[in-house]
């Protein structure tokens, strides 16, 4: 039986090389950046939040939380945005999905008035 001896973590080549690199480095002083520049540094590879992108069937089903047959039924009923065809595949504009989600009704809770218009808001401090 051959026994293997493990080196301590401080003697492994990667740790030794990293320690040598960091040995001569000075701490970096913090600088202040305008928010626009700071966001550009953090999210340089991300599309702007207002960019519309095309989403696959799998993405849309995951976001909405239903199966594709349910989406298809909703599209046929006119209660869900229809897909566009890109390269023979169904795709949805992210702006259409965002608008659909924004238009969803809010669930009423026990004790909520039947209609918000009927609620008396004079007693709110």
Image: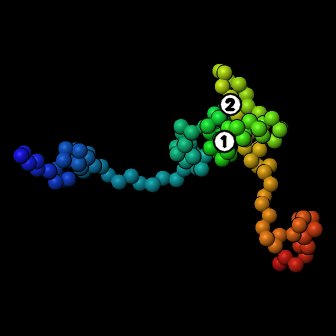
Question: Does dot 1 land on a helix, a strand or a loop?
Answer: loop
Residue drawn at (52%, 53%), measured in percent from left and top? 32
Q: Is residue 52 visible?
A: no
74 above or below 123? above
Residue drawn at (91%, 73%), measured in percent from left and top? 120
Question: Does dot 2 land on a helix, a strand or a loop?
Answer: strand
Residue beneath disc 2: 91
Question: Between 19 and 58, which is closer to the camera in this rendering?
Answer: 58
Q: Position of residue 86 (x, y in %)?
A: 67, 24
Question: Between 75 and 51, which is closer to the camera in this rendering?
Answer: 75
Q: Position of residue 62 (x, y in %)?
A: 62, 44
Q: Position of residue 67 (x, y in %)?
A: 66, 41
- Asked which quadrant contains residue 13, the reply is top left
Direction from residue 122 to residue 94 in the image, left or right: left
Residue drawn at (81%, 73%), measured in percent from left and top? 111
Question: Between 15 and 107, which is closer to the camera in this rendering?
Answer: 107
Q: Earlier in the sequence, mark 1 or mark 2?
A: 1
Residue beneath disc 1: 67
């Amino acid at each position: 039986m051959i026994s293997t001896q493990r080196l301590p973590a401080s003697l492994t080549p990667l740790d030794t090389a990293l320690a040598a690199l960091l040995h001569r480095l000075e701490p970096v002083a913090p600088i202040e950046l305008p928010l626009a520049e700071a966001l550009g540094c953090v999210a340089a590879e991300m599309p702007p939040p207002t960019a519309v992108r095309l989403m696959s069937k799998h993405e849309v089903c995951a976001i909405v939380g239903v199966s594709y047959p349910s989406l298809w039924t909703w599209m046929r009923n006119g209660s869900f945005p229809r897909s566009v065809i890109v390269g023979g595949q169904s795709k949805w504009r992210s702006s259409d999905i965002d608008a659909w989600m924004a238009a969803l009704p809010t669930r009423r809770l026990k004790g909520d008035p039947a209609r918000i218009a009927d609620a008396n808001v004079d007693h709110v401090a």
